[in-house]
Amino acid sequence: MSNKNKQEILLESGTNEIEIMEFKIGNNVFGINVAKVKEIIMPCPIKPMPNAHPSIEGVIKPRDMVITLVDLPEYLNLPPSESDERNLFIVTNFNQMHIAFRVHNVVGIDRISWTDIEKPDKTIYGGQDGVATGIAQCEGRLITILDFEKIVADISPETSIQISDIDKLGERPLNELPILVAEDSVLLSKMIHESLHKAGYTNTITCNNGQEAWDYISKIPKDGDLASKVACIITDLEMPSMDGHRLTKLVKADSYYKNIPLVIFSSLINEAMRIKGRELGADEQLSKPEIGRLVEVIDRLIDQSGAREQK
């Protein structure tokens, strides 16, 4: 995939579609968001690391960067390839990290609407609390979209949201202004909820995807005090049914709801995504581990909107 093609994909705005790179481990078909993929490389020398997680093969240095290599078949408890030299390494970039994943082969790229992606039930790779973030149907095939953030968090918990970061903000007053959070990961939704409550924002509205969030927002009467219904929106990007960019577009295109401060809180924040979010009207865009900064941004946006004084 050329950098030009990837850039064009990333800069399309609010279409509620996703580009999935389809790959295989054995006979199992999986998918990863193209926006997370930096490159695909042939296997290269691996330096094992002592006392590492069992799923970490070691580190590689394909160029001037040292990258951790995760044995994805091992992590998913799937059999290894009969011929490791024919495997590929998918080098990813999310949560401000570069991590490579071993796969058996790459099939290609599919464009899929988020409305065609369903949340898996609890029997598939751990279900709602597992590593399958969605099941996509494409031309008669079922593709399991993996939650790579959760995989990395399982292997290295310190790379995920740290609720303890809220302690660094010092003592904070309670605030009952409603904060709406659109996040499909059960784990991350819980961590964001706990972090906001610890920071004093005790009134959180949790939605599992952008569609649920939009359904909630669009039912708010267009009169009275808007901030008393939703004072701020926090949205992920990758979500079944409706993604965060589509939600942002719908909110900011509405003459009444556009006044609600909206923050994109995602593992996918990079320069191309910032341009896209800015074009759609997002007030702020933050990378997911930065929970302390998220609280500070919520504080600032609520103060700027005057919602705190209206309460």
Image (cartoon, rainbow, N blue to C red):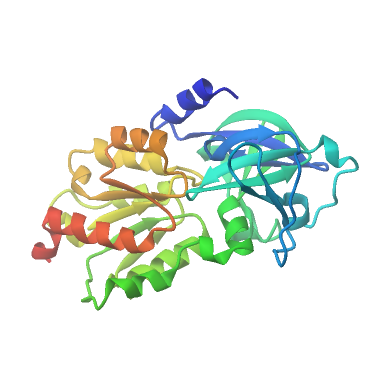
Q: Where residue 226 sits in the image (x, y, percent)?
A: 17, 55
Residue furthest front as drawn: 64
Query: Observer-nearest residue: 130 or 59?
Result: 59
Q: In the rendered image, is residue 33 in sight? A: yes
Horizontal side of 276 relative to 131 (left or right) equals: left
Q: Which residue occupies 79% across, 40% down?
A: 104
Q: Which residue occupies 81% across, 53% down?
A: 78
Q: Where residue 72 sits in the image (x, y, percent)?
A: 72, 50
The relative height of residue 4 versus residue 183 in the rendered view (above or below) is above
The part of the image, by quadrant, that contains residue 154 is bottom right
Q: Which residue occupies 74% across, 51% down?
A: 47
The relative height of residue 155 versus residue 37 in the rendered view (above or below) is below
The relative height of residue 104 versus residue 13 in the rendered view (above or below) is below
Q: In the rendered image, is residue 197 in sight? A: no
Q: Which residue occupies 35% across, 63% down?
A: 205
Residue furthest left as drawn: 309
Query: Observer-nearest residue: 23 or 168?
Result: 168
Quadrant holding the C terminus: bottom left
Horizontal side of 207 relative to 186 (left or right) equals: left
The relative height of residue 198 versus residue 99 in the rendered view (above or below) is below
Q: Where residue 185 sits in the image (x, y, percent)?
A: 52, 57
Q: Where residue 25 sits in the image (x, y, percent)?
A: 78, 43
Quadrant holding the N terminus: top right
The part of the image, by quadrant, that contains residue 228 is bottom left
Query: Observer-nearest residue: 269 or 243?
Result: 269
Query: Observer-nearest residue: 40 or 105?
Result: 40
